Amino acid sequence: MDLKDMILVTENDRGTETNMLMTLDDYKSFIAIDDMSELAENLLQLGRTLGEADNFTEYYRAANVTVSARFCLDDIQLGHFLQGFYNDSKEFRFDKEASSSECVAKLKEIGMTDKGWVDDFNLHYEMENRSFERGQTFHNFNDHDYMVLEALSPRNLVVMDMKSGSLTIALGATEYKRYPKDEKPTKDNTTIGVSWEHGIYLGSTLSTTNFKAYKREYGTPEKIEDIYDYRAKLKQKFYFYQDMSKDDDVPKKLQNDFLHQMYEDFGTIEEDCFYDRLEDAYARIKEPEKEETQKQERTQEMPEFSVTVTPYEREGSNIKGLARIYFENSFIVNNINIVQGKEKIFVSMPSYKTKQVDEQGKPIYQDVCYPVTKDFREKLYNEIISEYEKAKDKSNENARESAEKHHGNPDKEKDKEATPFR
């Protein structure tokens, strides 16, 4: 069974409190409500505890006998319940015999005693071989979900609690498979979780988190081979911020923090603007390099070329046309796509799928061929887009002429009726 299917039940009989763990069916039998409308109301109140932290529903079963109950939130709340955190008196007991057998078995499965303590002595931990990357989520043995914001090194991470939004540096993070020592691991008795040797709490404000400083202190320096590698890392970081700002599982405050951090790092939150700035920065970086060579390239005559474009329309596709380039009638480049972006169309050169993937697990593509100079790129791309517009207009005109041929032109027919003789 899942912990969230377990019901925490306390019976207060004239001041004597007894704690029990029950399934829903056993709970209904225990409270023994005959009136169906009253039972439905009680179960409705019980169901509402799923979205509340510490509230219990109460039912007066008999004179001086009160039953308090709620669905279990996680193993931390279960431990607190068994330790008496929710009891009015320190004098309470746990009734194992009155508890559901499934719930008692669940206690053994997660290694928790009926006193609310995890008995690691009776549990076996088996290390799993897992690598951590930015954007991944994982579960820990305290029943919390975390997201990796930055992998400082293979086992040192900056993580975010998906529920509270709090940030922590997890040092020595490792994934384990946990199950009882005297049993073989099965799907029912095995729990997968991540634990770390030491944690440094950072609060819950993303903008004050100095990832570079933590990288220097706890991480492995990144190796950036060239400008292309650096550009790829900037793209990964931009899209990570963008995805987190739109992720409904991320607290709203953190979504806004990611947008703020995106603007701080890139000066914009718009994708088109980001790419324009990336291209401008690339051009500025390359300008001082080999000035004499670049001067010769600027004066060098550009190769002659011609372009043919076929408009391409298919529902659900953002590809609007396919282009072919003829260089001086001696060399042809095929498979050039005209793609509809958010605001305008752009040219996508032929590319191949690399073995690398981004944060979403999607493959990264690399251009097979591309213009080297800015001037030639602008000339080539403008020519392709211009030919696409011409081809699209011609295609639309042909479609209209074909429609008129098959269905006739109403205006022309009207003129003929008005002037039968000329």
Image: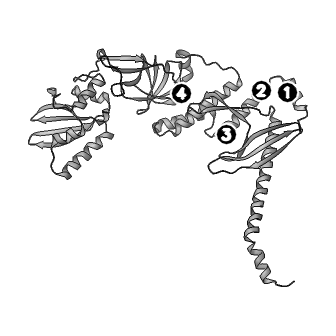
Q: Is residue 195 above or below residue 57?
A: above
Splitting the image into 4 quarters, where does residue 294 fall? top right
Q: Is residue 421 above or below residue 285?
A: below
> Mark 4 and mark 1 in contact (Cβ < 8 Å)?
no
> Of the residues shown, which amino acid type is indicated by label 4?
Arg
> Of the residues shown, which amino acid type is indicated by label 1?
Gln
- Element assignment for label 1: helix
| Quadrant, the N terminus | top left
Residue at which label 2 appears = 286
Q: Earlier in the sequence, mark 1 or mark 4?
A: 4
- The residue sitting at 57% across, 21% down in the picture is 212
Q: 10 Å neighbourhood of mark 2: few (<14), some, or many (≥20)? A: few
Residue at which label 3 appears = 273
> Of the residues shown, which amino acid type is indicated by label 3?
Cys
Q: Nearer the viewer, mark 1 or mark 4?
A: 4
- Give the label on residue 134, or none: 4
Q: Earlier in the sequence, mark 2 or mark 4?
A: 4
Give x and y (percent) for residue 216: 56, 16
- The residue sitting at 81% across, 83% down in the picture is 419
In this rendered view, identify the residue nearer to me: 394 or 198: 394
User: Marks 1/4: CA distance?
Assistant: 38 Å
- The residue sitting at 34% across, 16% down in the picture is 124
- The residue sitting at 59% across, 30% down in the picture is 358
Q: Nearer the viewer, mark 2 or mark 4?
A: 4
